[in-house]
Image: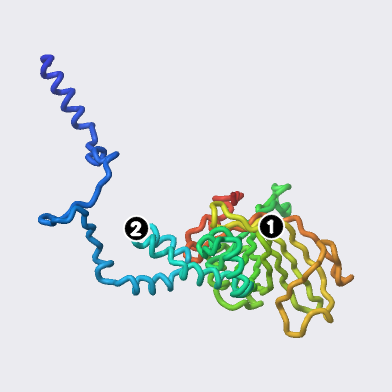
Amino acid sequence: MATLLPAQRGSLRYDNFQFLETKRPWLSLYGIRVRPVAPVGSTSSKPVVESSLLHRTLPDELIQEVFMRLTPYSLGRAACVCRKWRYSTRMPCLWRNACLKTWQVSGREENERLCAETYGSSWRAMWHSRPRLRYDGLYVSRNTYIRAGIAEWKITNPVHLVCYYRYLRFYPNGKFLYKTSPLRVKEVAKSMQGRATKSEGLFSGRCTLEGAQVEGAVLYPGSQPTVLKIRLRLRGTIPGAYNRLDLLSLVTSGVDENDVASGSEDVIIDGWQDDETHNPDIPAISHRRGMQPFVFIPFEEVDTSVLNLPVEKMDYYVPG
């Protein structure tokens, strides 16, 4: 059996250490602030920062025109590109247009007054701090319950886990679409991006937003019209997101045909109590099942959302 000299054993250990060690040259840059260097031959003491090819090609006016056509959430992504884009995305005109479009029901004068009195004339602060509904996606509530099955063969107590969804899509003019379906998000999103059709189980209604509370009503037409009144609380998992809607109450009640305008399918019921009945044939019912919070899903994420998972992979979903 061969033996190794002490020098050889030391070199072997050193070689193994060199082999197992991962070199990280970027560690030497920690704590060092990289500053621009003045070009060679320049007499100026100030360093010159070389702009990118995009900034040298496009003037500031064209960049502003591009930003004017972006959504506020796309502006937030653009602000992360570089320092110049960050300052460009803070132009007041960009956020003013976004605020006026989002709260167009309030009117231009009311929005300008509220921005000046409450948010220090900062449209960007108004966009981030004022509660608002999002229009670039769907609010989805995933609900499950256990239903007893029919006894067959040797199975005497079969049970089934039933999963269904409530869908809400809001519009800036105060209208919204409502749908209850067992279909998953990616199967319903396309139908809710178009016009509401009763054949697909879509119903249109009207809603109001006061502070963080949302109230809406949907009219189910027919021989005995029924109104679904829904009350929700708007919140966000992070500041300014407003991606959650807590379902506070869900009430159905009959409506007198004389109180419903001819040809109208979207109404707002003001001052109704939860147990108030307007048609003795269809009394008011306050529902307690299916009260899971709504989660906002942008249209570009409907195919990849976890809410598309079947019940065998996700029997219960905690919105947070």
Q: Which residue is mark 2?
A: 83
Q: Residue at x 47, y 67 (%)?
A: 92
Marks 1 and 2 sit apart, C-alpha to C-alpha, by 41 Å
For label 1, the SS is strand
Asked whether disc 1 touches disc 2, contact meaning CB atoms under 8 Å apart, the reply is no
Residue 131, image x, y percentages:
61, 61
Viewer-closest of 6 and 84: 84
Viewer-closest of 84 and 245: 84
Q: Is residue 3 visible?
A: no
Q: Which residue is mark 1?
A: 247
Tag 2: Cα neighbours inside 10 Å, few (<14), some, or many (≥20)?
few
In this rendering, the label closer to the viewer, 1 or 2: 2
Specify the quadrant of the image occupied by residue 134: bottom right
- Residue 87, numbered label: none
Dot 2 amino acid type: Arg
Q: Is residue 77 left or right of residue 27?
A: right
Q: Is residue 229 visible?
A: yes
